[in-house]
Image (cartoon, rainbow, N blue to C red):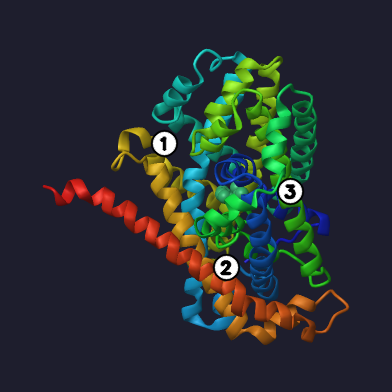
Amino acid sequence: MSERETWSTRAGFILAAVGSAVGLGNIWQFPFQAASNGGSAFVVVYLAAVMLIGFPAMLAEFVVGRSTERNPVDAFRELGGGSWSVVGALGVFTAFWILSFYSVVGGWVIRYILGSAQGAYFGDPTGYFGAIMSGPDALALHAVFMALVVGVVALGVEDGIEAGTKLMVPSIVVLLIGLGAWAFTLDGAAAGYAYYLSPDLATLKANFWSVLPKAVGQAFFTLSLGMGAMVTYASYLGDDDSLPVDGGLIVGMNTLVGLLAGLVVIPILATQVSVEAIRQTSGAGAVFISLAEAFAQLPAGRILGVVFFGVLLLAALSSAISLLEVVVSYITQNSGWDRKPAAAVFGLAVFLLGIPTAFSASLTYAGTGALTWYNDLAYNLLLPVSVLGVLVFVGWLRDDTASVELTKGTDAGPGSATAWIWAMRTVVSLAVVVTLFLGVQDLLVAAKVLAEPIIAL
Ligand code: PFF
C-alpha cells in the first residue's frame, strides 16, 4: 500500500473541514428552516443544538479518525473489534446515499448560474424551476456536478481537496459578506432583519417539540456528522493539533456562515414579500423559486444571481468532495485500487444511485418526490443512528482512549475530558434518541400515506 496521505498544514485541515461543513445545508436549508420555524426562535434552538450536541459529537468523530489514521470502517474495527466496524460502514453508506441526491441539487445550482446570467427564469421563476428540477436536463447536470467532484478527489488529499478548499472557502466567505452588504442597502430589507434577529420566545415555546428534532438534525447535517466525513478528514491529521481548538474553529466558522447566509437570504426575500409569506416559504424549491423571484425584480439581478448561485455551487462542491473522499479512502485502503480509478468508479456509482432523484417529479410516491424520500431517510434515520453509534462507542466503550486522544496536542491532561465524556453519555445521546424517535415517527406516517393506495387495492 502506498504511504498514507496527510494535510500539508493545519489550516489545510481546518479549511477542508469547514468546506465540508459549509454547504447547501447552511445556505439553502438553514435560512429557510429558520424562516418557516419562527425566525430567530429557531436560530436560538439551532445554536444550542450546534454547541451542546453537534460540537461534542464532532470531537468524537475526530478522536476515532485521528487515533487510528484509518477510514471509518477500519477505524471502528481497530478500536472496537469486528462488529463495531458496522458503525463505520453505516457512515460510509450514509455518505454514499446523501451524496447521490445532494449532487442532483448541485446540478440545479449549476443550471441557475447559467439561468441567472441569461435571465432565463426572470419571466416565470416557478415554471422554470418546475421545468429544470427533473428530467434529462437535471440528470445531465447531476453528471456534471459529480464529474467536478470526482476531478477534485482524484487529485488527492493535498493537491485536490486541500488546494481546492483553500480557494473555495475564503471565496464563499468574501462573496457572502459582499452579498450581505448589498442586501443591507435594499429598500424593505429591515423587515427581514427584524424577523430574523428579534427573539420570538412565544413561537419558540409553542413549537419547541417540533422544532427540536429539526434543529438537532440540522446541526448534524451542517457539521457533516454521521457520514464518516469528519472521521476521514481527522485521519489525515497529525498528533500535535488540538482537536478541541480545531473543532471549535470549524463549528464557529460554520455557524457564522449559516447566520450570514440568513442575513443575505431573508432580507432579499423581505424586499419582495411580507414576513408572513416568508414564514410560509419552505421546501426544496424555496431558494430556487423565491430567491429567483427576487433576483428577477431587483436591479442588477442577473449579476447578483450569478454571484449568489456561484457561492452556493462552491459550498456544495466543497461539501460533496468530503463525502466522495469517505468512500474513496475506504476503497483505496481495502483493495489494490488507486485513488483515481476509485474516485471515478465510485463517483459513477453515486451518480447512478442519484438517478431516481433526478427524475423526482415523474417518480412521485403519494405526491412526494424521490428526492424527498432520499432526504428524509437520511435525515430522520441514517444520520441519527450513525451519530448514536459513534456516541455510544466513544462515550462508553472507548472513553479512556478517547480522553487521551482528545487532549493530545493540548496542555490539558486526559482528566479534563470528563465533562465531554459525560456530555456524550447524557444530553447528547438523549437529544439524539429523541430526534430519532420523532424522526422515525415522521417516516412511518409518510410510509403509511405511501402505502394507502396499495392497501386500497
Ligand atoms: N455539511 C454539509 C451541508 O451542510 O451541506 C452536509 C453535507 C451534505 C456534506 C452532503 C456533504 C454532502 F455531500
Q: Residue at x 76, y 51 (%)?
A: 253
Instruction: Give how far across and how far down residue 81 sits, in percent.
Output: 52, 83
For disc 3, the neighbor class at 10 Å (few under 14, some 14 to 19, many from 20) is: some
Pick the front one: 19 or 296? 296
User: Which tag is nearer the camera, tag 2 or tag 3?
Assistant: 2
Instruction: Give how far across and how far down residue 259 sits, in percent.
Output: 71, 45
Instruction: Give how far across and how far down residue 46 sits, in percent.
Output: 64, 55
Amino acid at pointer 1: Ala
Q: Residue 159 carries which label?
A: 3
Amino acid at pointer 2: Pro
Residue sitting at the far right: 411
> The N terminus is located in which quarter?
bottom right
For disc 1, the neighbor class at 10 Å (few under 14, some 14 to 19, many from 20) is: many
Instruction: Give how far across and how far down residue 263 sits, in percent.
Output: 72, 37
* For residue 394, side relative to residue 92 (left or right): right
Q: Residue at x 79, y 35 (%)?
A: 177
Q: Earlier in the sequence, mark 2 or mark 3?
A: 2
Helix, strand or loop status at disc 2 = helix
Residue designated by label 1: 358
User: Which tag is nearer the camera, tag 3 or tag 1?
Assistant: 1
